[in-house]
Amino acid sequence: MKISFIKYEKEQNYQIPKLLGMNVQEIKRPEQIDEKIEQLKNEKYTTIVIPNELASFSEHIINKYKYDSKLNIIITPTKRNS
């Protein structure tokens, strides 16, 4: 099982996955989310963790990836600083 996290470049909440040696991919623009998911899928990642703020930019999460039996996408809540 290969797991990757996708983060927006301005997010800082990924130190723990990095310290544990997990793959953390960074995108510069939220609109790049579908490209990054496809890239990770082609690299045989089976689980991709995405914050809900980035997931909202994906055109394919509902109509394409939801039915892909070889890919699990986990959408996590975005932590807000108050």
Image (cartoon, rainbow, N blue to C red):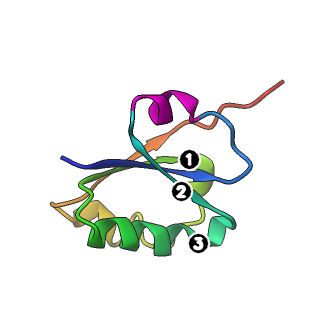
Real-space Cα separation, disc 3 to disc 1, in angstroms? 14 Å
User: How many numbered circles are shown?
Assistant: 3
Q: Point out residue 47 in the picture as x, y percentages from the top left corner.
A: 29, 50
- Image quadrant holding the C terminus, namely top right
Task: Give SS at disc 3.
Answer: helix
Q: Point out residue 11 in the picture as x, y percentages from the top left corner.
A: 69, 43
Q: Residue furthest right?
A: 82
Q: What are the residue bounds of the magenta stretch?
A: 14-20
The kind of residue tagged 3 is Gln
Q: Residue 52: which disc?
A: 1
Q: Residue 32: which disc?
A: 3
- Give the residue displayed 41% in from the left and 66% down from the top: 37
Residue 15 located within the stretch drawn in magenta: yes
The kind of residue tagged 2 is Ala
Of discs 3 and 1, which sits in the foreground? 3
- Sooner in the amino-acid sequence: mark 3 or mark 2: 3
Q: Are marks 1 and 2 in contact (CB under 8 Å)?
A: yes
Judging depth in this view, the residue of 63 and 2 nearest the camera is: 2
